[in-house]
Image (cartoon, rainbow, N blue to C red):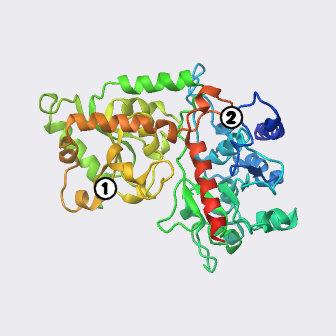
Amino acid sequence: MAYLTHFILLLLINLASSQQISNTESSSSTTTNPTSTEDCNNRWIYIRNLPSRFNLDLLTNCSEYPIFDDFCPYLANHGLGQKTHTKSRSWYRTDPLLLELIFHRRILEYPCLTNDPNVANAVFLPYYGAIDSLKYLYGPDVNSSFQHGMGLFDFLQSDEPGIWNRHMGHDHFLVISRPAWDFCQPLDNDPPIWGTSFLELPEFYNVTVLVPEGRAWPWQEHAVPYPTSFHPPNLACFEAWIQRVRRSRRVSLMLFAGGGGIGASPNIRRSIRTECENANTSMTKDNTGYSQICHIVDCSNGICEHDPIRYMRPMLQATFCLQPPGDTPTRRSTFDAITAGCIPVFFEEMSARSQYRWHLPEEKYPEFSVFIPKEEVVFKGLKILDVLMGIPRNEVRKMRESVIELIPRVMYRRHGSSLGLRTKKDAFDTAIDGALQTIKDKLNDL
């Protein structure tokens, strides 16, 4: 089954690539084409032609890592996964690991592709780095993790080296669908610890890397949203969802969808669970206006990861969605919450504010989110409930509307979507804009 999926993906991606580049490059002589040469000024992207061993061949190993989940079922629909149900048009069982495949498919529809690397303002590397890293993180090459990416670099140096040497990689960018922490193991670690050394390789220092979570001291990486399960194909489906979000009755004050917090050691997730249990027994609708003060959706052991119905319906009914850090500061749940019009509550700056500057402007955070330092909750007894109940209702309505306005910027619309929906910039479009501007700034500084 994996080999059949691989063959179909290879065929479709190659076909879409050749057709799109051909259509784009002929646009300057076609008055009916919506993309003109003027529209593409400073926006031309060249997709580097990589051997399939760097991308699609890696998908044939989708079930070969016993410690890691089998991701074969989620390769469908070019990485969006299977539909949540047969009649669904916008909802899929999306695995965040496949952001690389999703991005690869979407960039083939980018209106300013070129076959000439010499006129390109940026060069995209369709390398599935996170999937390639599995053999180092979970497979037999764990003791060779410093070699992650070296095969790619050798290829870039040996095959048409002028493309790389033109700006020594400063104009190149790629997507890696795991947090940057997984790729910053120091090269001199002996024996190796968790992770690979991809982001520590001097050979790739100049490359712009898009990841779902960056480090506190970003060198070359920039954070982009985790893919949610919402991928509308047209404007009608998108607008229908927005209307549902606006009309939804918010019967819960706050919601936490996740696991953890059951151990004895003090931490923010344990504090949330304790406060929720106490609030639900001590407060009523008469003195709060809510049918439920705190709703916990137990997502332990990954049971929610590919089942958006478990958490999206409760999020639609909640006013605030709590986003405590877990193993790392960021959470896919942040973007699920925004998609549901649920106001995110952060407990660390690194959970979002210091991450997604392209998609969630830093200066606008007070308009669409709440920040409560986790130390105040865990060690000083600050009640989350008191903070949230203290926000006036009219302010809450304004915040929810600001959240709803962000939905297009954090969703990845389905490939092949309608022209009407393409007028709304989504997470992919915003990431491309950010990458192009970053590369332009770097080249100007050379």
Q: Which residue is mark 2?
A: 76
- Circle 2: element type: loop
Q: Quick one: label 1 or label 2, which is nearer the N terminus?
A: 2
Which residue is nearer to you in this view: 253 or 273?
A: 253
Location of residue 327 (image quadrant): bottom left
Residue at the image point whose x is 58% and y is 52% from the top: 434
| Quadrant where the image shows the N terminus | top right
Residue at the image point whose x is 21% and y is 30% from the top: 290
Location of residue 234 (image quadrant): top right
Mark 2 surroundings: few (<14), some (14-19) or many (≥20) residues within 10 A:
some
- Horizontal and vertical percent position of residue 400: 34, 35
- Horizontal and vertical percent position of residue 267: 31, 59
Q: Is residue 416 visible?
A: yes
- Above or below 356: residue 286: above
Mark 1 surroundings: few (<14), some (14-19) or many (≥20) residues within 10 A:
many
Q: Give, as a three-letter code, the residue at label 2.
A: Ala
Location of residue 2 (image quadrant): top right
- Circle 1: element type: helix
Residue 17 as seen in the image, left or right of residue 380: right
Give the CA distance from mark 1 to mark 2.
37 Å
Q: Which residue is mark 1?
A: 268
Q: How many marks?
A: 2
- Horizontal and vertical percent position of residue 173: 68, 57
Q: Is residue 295 visible?
A: no
Q: Give, as a three-letter code, the residue at label 1.
A: Ile
